[in-house]
Amino acid sequence: MSITVTLPDGKPLELPDGATGADAAAAIGPGLARAALAIEVSHPEAGEEGEVRDLARALPDGARVSIITAKSGEKALELIRHDAAHVLAAAVMDLYDGVKISIGPAIAEGFYYDFEFPDGTAVSEADFPRIEERMREHIKAAETFQRRDVSPAEARERFVAERQDYKVELIDDLVASADPAHPLKTVSLYTNGPFTDLCRGPHAPTTQTVSAFKLGSVAGAYWRGDSDRTMLTRIYGTAFFSKKELAEHEERLEQARARDHRKLGRELDLFMFSELSPGSPFWKPAGLAIWNALSELWRSENRRRGYREVKTPILFDVELFKQSGHWDTYRDHMYFTDVEDRPMGLKPMNCPAHIQIYKDARRSYRDLPIRYSEAGLVHRHEPSGTLHGLMRVRHITQDDAHIFCTEEQVQQEVVQCLRFGFFLYELFGFEPRLELSTRPEKRIGSEEMWDRAEGALAGALEAEGLNYELNPGDGAFYGPKIDLHMTDSIGRSWQLGTVQLDYSMPERFDLLYTGADNGEHRPVMIHRALMGSFERFIGILIEHYAGEFPVWLAPVQAIVLPVSDRFNDYAASVRDRLLDEQARVELDDRNESIGRKIREAELRKIPYMLVVGEREAGEGTVAVRTHGAAGERGGGEGEGVSVEQFSERLLGELYSSALKPRKSSERHA
RNA sequence: GCCGGAGUAGCUCAGCUGGUAGAGCACCUGUCUUGUAAACAGGAGGUCAGGGGUUCGAGACCCCUCUCCGGCUCCA
């Protein structure tokens, strides 16, 4: 008897019955046999998607196979990182008595393993050297990863005897969640050296492959991600196939840390924080310049799309929040105070305020859609442990808007919001990830309402042909939402824009409009913030540009640098000339060397440095040096540019291209 | 909020097993009059996050609080 498998190039390979992945690799060649780590098996006829398996497992007849080696990219990395997690667990078990293991998967940039250490044992990064040392021993021993399929009862017995409560719970859950028609017959155990773990696999043949690894950090993590359960100790690490790749990875991380907006915020003097108001940025002049440029863009683009800007209070009688539902669902995250014995609260959202404006007049179907925009200041008591620079603050300025429309207008309005969002993101070269979040546990409104709202959002996404992820249960308490996410410099994902559908607030506030039939109807509300908040968006912008902003966003667009104080008067006249063009321009007339002035302007990442000395003062010119590209006296584009010429050029870059007038046919949304 | 770590001059950091606080840059003053990434000299600057404790003596050790960092949970 023999079996036939198909190789990636389409060629069939005949093997004896019961042949394994290792046999297949050996049949192809001795080099591949040595390099093989695992094998990807797919069996389209049997409906089996590609699955990476151990080399030691028998291949099914008729399968398509592909040998995984160190060159197989992500799949190979995932494999050895998972191996590394087992090696880590083995080392920790060696070093700490009574430690309980839970789970240890490979993740995007590495791996982790979650442990429960005995009471009184705190593990910190200081312990990493000895843990790593122990890991190296397991790797040097080239322990084989041996898989054993056993009955759930046998596995359970084993882990009960070892007091591995988490493993016992995992087995019980596996058994309980199995389809009653096909009860779970086996679970797999993997053993390397003295360590055995409940694990689905696959693994490389031995621990030897995990040669280039490093532990990264230690963190708390709730068992099963549930904050009501035990907090375990998570140890993060990463692994590569070579020391070189590991070093490159660390180099990348270091470069990423250099663009951290908190670091750049300090270096470029953009904003600061004070212990006296945690989670609340103080915008310094340079940072506010960015804010204002962005705000100008936001304002003009809103106007173009039929939004009318409003401004509303931040402090309200709590009655408003009782009516809106915030009191019931959001109280713990709000700030309250008493004003002359009257309980008041800071708004955590702008919608109830915009609703007051809607209700200030009788509305007709002819008025709809009504679109109110506001750079609305809200306060949210974010838990202390979650604050993070500009990304997670308690004092939030949303680029908010609320659209009041008819049921029929919902989809087109949502589509317009999405297009508007993409228009903005494309200006910065952002490629956001989309999520559709559906009804949460804590919610208001009927099931039919949620059905309709979720359907409308999904409909808009599909009408636009957009790819999105479903995020069940993550909607706002009043309605489902579409969120736009971006990642920061080190890969953390942050929600920026959001488009939320709301049939509930209009009901709670008894919003009405008069229809063509002269009857009263209920409008639908759309809550939308595209950048999300100015704070978070600017945080992302800083990291995106690594502080090297395009001219229209740069806090200082040009700086005039006189070579000596004999040319200060001429330099001031150049500065004044550019100020007249509304440019953000500075003059560095300190008694310092030109080298010093240039160095400091470079460090401030100012786009244009205008050096003026004897020759420039005589000719009415400037010597232009652009940031990052060293200028040259006596040559290059920089020398002898008239102030006129430079002013023209700067004028062309002072505003985002989006802010320049354009014909309605060019409008994106 | 939870787990772990950290907090020394404006910034970046040093400060041994407890013996009474230091560097570079920035700042101020003076000299120099500068041509494309750091002129030279001098000076000033600290309740070592805050509070309590141990000790003859604490920046170092212990406890509490605050803030920050890395995660987890949460995030309208």
Image: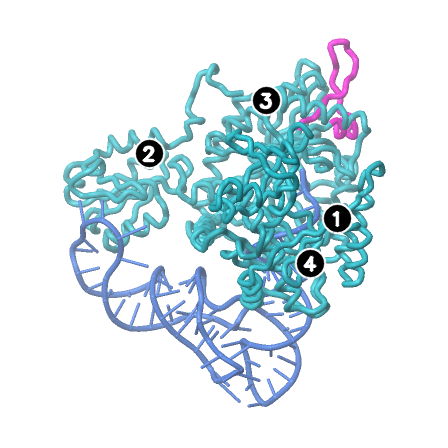
What stretch of residues is rendered in magenta?
A503-526
- Of the two numbered discs 1 and 3 on the same chain, state the one appearing first in sequence: 1
Within-10-Å neighbours for mark 3: few <14, some 14–19, many 20+: few
Q: In this rendering, do the residues under marks 3 and 2 share a single chain?
A: yes
The question of residue A6 being in magenta is answered with no
Q: Colour of chain A?
A: cyan
In the rendered image, which quarter contains the N terminus of chain A? top right
Q: Residue at x 74, y 13 (%)?
A: A515
**To which residue does mark 1 refer?**
A187
Which numbered tag is attached to residue A465?
3
Q: In this rendering, do the residues under marks 4 and 1 share a single chain?
A: yes
Chain appearing in blue on the rendered image: B
The question of residue A517 being in magenta is answered with yes
How far apart are the two marked residues, 4 and 3, measured between alpha carbons? 47 Å
- Of the two numbered discs 2 and 4 on the same chain, state the one appearing first in sequence: 4
Q: Is residue A338 visible?
A: no
- Of the two numbered discs 4 and 3 on the same chain, state the one appearing first in sequence: 4
How far apart are the two marked residues, 3 and 2, measured between alpha carbons? 46 Å
Check contact, mark 4 vs mark 1: CB within 8 A: no
Within-10-Å neighbours for mark 1: few <14, some 14–19, many 20+: many
Question: Furthest-top residue in view?
Answer: A517
Q: Amino acid at mark 3?
A: Gly
- Of the two numbered discs 2 and 1 on the same chain, state the one appearing first in sequence: 1
Question: Furthest-right residue in view?
Answer: A180
Q: Is residue A293 visible?
A: yes
